[in-house]
Image (cartoon, grey):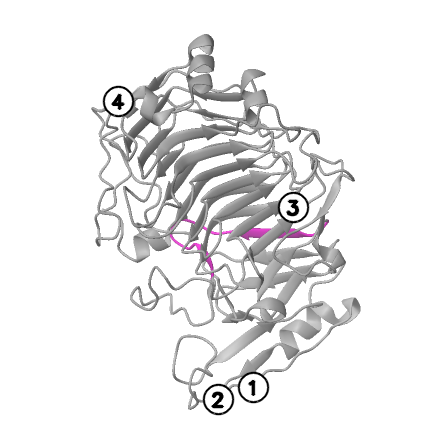
Amino acid sequence: MKKYLSVTLKPIFALVAILTLAVFTGCSDDDNNSSVGPDDGDESFAFLFDDMIQAGDSMNLSADSNWLVSGFVFVEEGAALSIEPGAVIRFRPGTGVNASALIIARGGRIWANGTQDNPIIFTAEVDDVNDPSDLGLFDNGLWGGLIILGSATVNTPTGLSQIEGIPSDEIRGEYGGNDDNDNSGSLRYVSIRHGGSEIGAANEINGLTLGGVGRQTVIEYVEIYSNFDDGVEFFGGVPSTRNIAVAFCGDDAFDYDEGFRGNGQFWFAVQHEKVGNRCGEHDGATGDEQGTPFAHPIISNATYIGSGNRSANSDNDYAIIMRDNAGGEYHNSIFYGFQGSGLHVEDKTGEAIEHSRARLEAGDIVFNNNIWYSFGAGNTMNDVFQQEFVRTVMAQQGWTNEMVDPLINSVARLNTGALNPVPSASGPAANAADQPAGAFFQNVSYKGAFQPGSANWLKGWTALDHYGFLQ
């Protein structure tokens, strides 16, 4: 049986002591389900426990060690965690107080910069990343997730909040402030797999949680694969993210709340045929829905592929829902293959509670130059946008939204090698003219997350590619 040693290291000893005390040799795996890591033989593991990365510490996780996280591990204020390309970080299983997660606390930083050939992988303890058949699509909730907290603005009454997914009395779970230029580090070519463990009733950890993250933080080429809860959830802040992929998650693909105002480009989501809610669940605030700043992110070149017309499960009712006084924009995007309709804007006119219809009519919700196709409700404008007031505003603003086949091969989502989200070079996705303003957005002339007829940026580094889902 593997032996574990829990240690607490003070800052003065942390950097040296971690490297000398945290590496242990495991014994052979003779007990049922008692192994650490995916192999049956002897192995050495470098353990990460809480209090290992305190203020003033700088820790590096090398690619040639077998890293194993036990419990909630915080990179505390003033500390930095670096992860080498090709590193695999595994997490022990558990729920509630026994869950495992990596949390970058407010004022801490993570530098996880993989490459297309050597991505950084966060995954479950039992995942043998060299064996694509080791875990399946429904093997989720096996650990927690990656949580990054910053000091950017959120619209809660106090300007601060406590992140969901970790105990409410954990002070290092606080986020928010007034520094929208805050920098929590960078994530590049990172794959987050099989997470989402529960810590309480209806309280799970997202694959990637961003709470009050600032605009100086770099997040691009990140995949969340088979998470039990949401793929990515933004709680306020202004992080800008590019080339984000969410695949086969149990709840929403992209969720935002608490006044999120970042930018996004080249977002991709694909749902499982049997589970999953919306690809975009967009809320304005928690509690006081008049809280400012209002949520108003700008997203361009998204491709959202739904679960198809699965009549046995009505959870997938819309591609996108806007509610709780949320605003936001989608440009040059593709929404394809959902059970219900395309866009639902919350309308509670006459009630005390705020609603997103007010944001739509104020010009804070924009859907322009997008393609919508293959909806269970039908493929006419009235089917995709079922609310008359939405269609009225669209006409008044002169938005362009096409109900045409984008020519992507994605219907057989679960068949090996059947998924190809890259549209045909000769199809309608090859033309786009609505480029959002701002230095962040790359000036491209196509709709969706992938350049029609060109290389698929998911290849080489994602679980989707590794497990053989991509054409």
Q: Amino acid at mark 1?
A: Lys
Tag 2: residue type? Cys
- Which residue bears the numbered disc 4? 428
| Label 2 close to label 1 by CB (< 8 Å) | yes
Q: Is 274 displayed left or right of 55 in the figure?
A: left
Q: Residue at x 44, y 85 (%)?
A: 42
User: Can you give x and y, in whole percent of width and height, for residue 276 in the image?
Assistant: 40, 49
Quarter assignment of residue 205:
bottom right
Towards the viewer: 414 or 186: 414
Name the residue type under label 4: Pro
Please report whichever mark, 1 or 4, sits nearer to the chain's N-terminal start. 1
In the image, residue 373 lies at what x, y percent? Answer: 28, 29
10 Å neighbourhood of mark 2: few (<14), some, or many (≥20)?
Answer: some
Q: What residue is pinned by disc 2?
A: 27
**Magenta residue span:** 107-122
Residue 184's disc is: 3
Looking at the rendered structure, the secondary structure element under dot 1 is: loop
Q: Is residue 408 magenta?
A: no
Give the residue at x 33% y 63%.
Answer: 136
- Is 341 rendered above or below residue 206? above
Find out whether the residues at labels 4 and 2 contact each other: C-beta distance under 8 Å.
no
Residue for badge 1: 3
